[in-house]
Amino acid sequence: MRGYDPAVPASDGVLDTGSESEAADGADLVLSVNSASAAVDALESGVATAAMWADLNTASPGTKRRLAGIATAHGVPFADVAIMAPVPGKGLRVPMLATGEAAERVAQILRPFGASVEVMSGPAGLAAERKLLRSVFFKGMAAAVVEALTAARAAGCEDWLREIVENELTNADASTVERLVSGSYRHARRRTAEMAAAAEMLDELGVAADVAGAARDHLARL
């Protein structure tokens, strides 16, 4: 395995190289694992010597399609690979979703090493779309929990609210999603006023009302 990173040296077991193109030269598969902001530059720097390219960065579907176009123009098969769970503790076994021209071939190369790669038919960008849709829900929920507990701590009742959050998550079932969606539409006017009051309360507690304010505005649009 060869690697290149302009900021840090390679870890044990990886042959350090001086550029993306040097790392890609002769490799059966290139895994681009950096940041979305660097994904295009990395591909443009290494694509001339690459045999196959898989982009594992958390980038938008549009960026993934742009990457696929660059790779195709150079005759390099491309796969959009989305990492669907936290990597620490799982490593290569972290669930991944792959789409694009080279998705199946990428999966065939990685699976013998213990990788968990699900292949979905369709062009590059679909895997990123699925991951980011999940992120809207999961990261949004996490932000709401953090903001609520921060406010509860300021109000002196963090343990009480933490227990409520834990109970709600534990007791959630198939009907929970429908209840959340239908209730938001049915009671949008009343809930707009409720979240306006909640945002005002957070301001009084000295806590930034980022999520509460966004919820208020979202309900107002509904």
Image: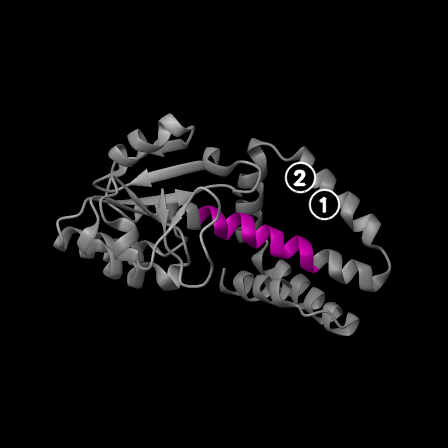
| Main secondary structure type of the part rendered in magenta | helix
Query: The residue tagged with tag 2: helix, strand or loop?
Result: helix
Query: The residue tagged with tag 1: helix, strand or loop?
Result: helix
> Could you say where residue 57 lies in the image, as x and y percent from the top left?
39, 52
- Which amino acid is tagged 1? Val
User: Is 122 on the left-hand or right-hand side of 129?
Assistant: left
Question: Which residue corresponds to the image point at 38% horizontal and 64% vertical from the top-left?
Answer: 37
Which residues lie in the magenta part? 133-147
Which residue lies under the disc numbered 2? 169
> Could you say where residue 143 lies in the image, as x and y percent from the top left?
61, 56
Q: In the rendered view, tell whether residue 136 sits above or below residue 108.
A: below
Mark 1 crowd level (few <14, some 14–19, many ≥20, 10 Å Cα): some
Question: Which residue corresponds to the image point at 67% horizontal and 53% vertical from the top-left?
Answer: 145
Q: Nearer the viewer, residue 30 or 83?
A: 30
User: Is 24 on the left-hand or right-hand side of 129?
Assistant: left
Which residue lies under the disc numbered 1? 165
> Could you say where residue 58 lies in the image, as x and y percent from the top left?
41, 53
Mark 2 crowd level (few <14, some 14–19, many ≥20, 10 Å Cα): few
Among the 4 quarters of the image, the one containing residue 62? bottom left
Magenta run includes residue 137? yes
- Could you tell me if residue 59 is visible in this image? yes
Per the rendering, the mark at residue 152 is none
- Could you tell me if residue 186 is visible in this image? no
For the residues labelled 1 and 2, say whether their Cβ atoms are less than 8 Å apart.
yes
Quadrant in which the N terminus is drawn: top left
Spatial CA span between label 1 and label 2: 6 Å
